Amino acid sequence: MSNRSAEQMPVKIKIKTTIWNEEGKNTAEFITFGKYIKKENTAFLQYDEVQEQGKINTIVKLSNNKLFIMRSGAVKMKLLFRQDKQLSGLYDTPYGKLTMTTLTKRLDYFHDMQKSVGNIELLYDLNVQGSRAGTYHLLITYTEVLK
């Protein structure tokens, strides 16, 4: 990181999601800006995205080989991931809460402090209300934005 606080840096974030389900393969990508924050042994990525439903604030938290994704705003969701574990989460809709379970097949995290870049790779099976929603591959890459 540059001479700014070692705790936080502005970043450009690229998010690529690939989903395999009954309908085949679907890939979506977007680029946004946010913050990378490091507190002791925990790293955070914080960013906003705008979708048809409205603005969504997303926090990705990495600690102790666990990944937690929390979304608030137009979409409210909490999902937890841990390698080779099946874990429960929630998706809050206008019609009620949906239970979700994830089975994490791959969880990799890389951060290079000298180059101020990093990436998070996540591969998991998702079930919603007990029904298989598909296999998801999430790749998040981030780079420090110099002013």
Image: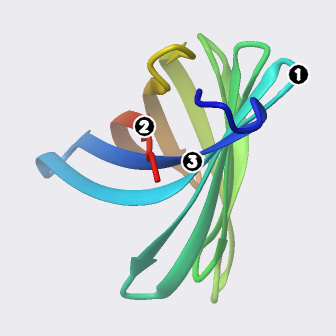
Q: Which residue is mark 3?
A: 130
State the residue position of label 2. 142
Q: Which of the pair 13/51 is nearer the observer? A: 13
How far apart, in angstroms, are the residues tagged by discs 2 and 3? 33 Å
Q: Is residue 97 left or right of residue 124?
A: right
Mark 3 residue crowding within 10 angstroms, few (<14) / some (14–19) / many (20+): few
Label 1 CA crowd tier, 10 Å (few <14, some 14–19, many 20+): few
Question: Which residue type does callout 1 highlight?
Answer: Glu
Q: Which residue is mark 1?
A: 40
Q: Quadrant of the N terminus?
A: top right
Q: Quadrant of residue 20?
A: top left
Please tell me whether residue 116 is drawn above or below residue 17 in the rendered image.
above
For numbered disc 1, what is the local secondary structure? Answer: loop
Residue name at image x 39 percent, y 60 percent: 32
Q: Locate residue 136 relative to residue 49 in the image: left or right.
A: left
Please tell me whether mark 3 sits on a helix, a strand or a loop: loop
The amino acid beneath tag 2 is: Tyr
Three-letter amino acid code at the position of disc 3: Gly
Q: How far is disc 2 from disc 1 in space, using C-alphas?
A: 20 Å
The spot of residue 22 in percent (x, y) is 19, 46
Residue at mark 1 to residue at mark 3: CA–CA distance = 36 Å
Among the 4 quarters of the image, the one containing residue 98: bottom right
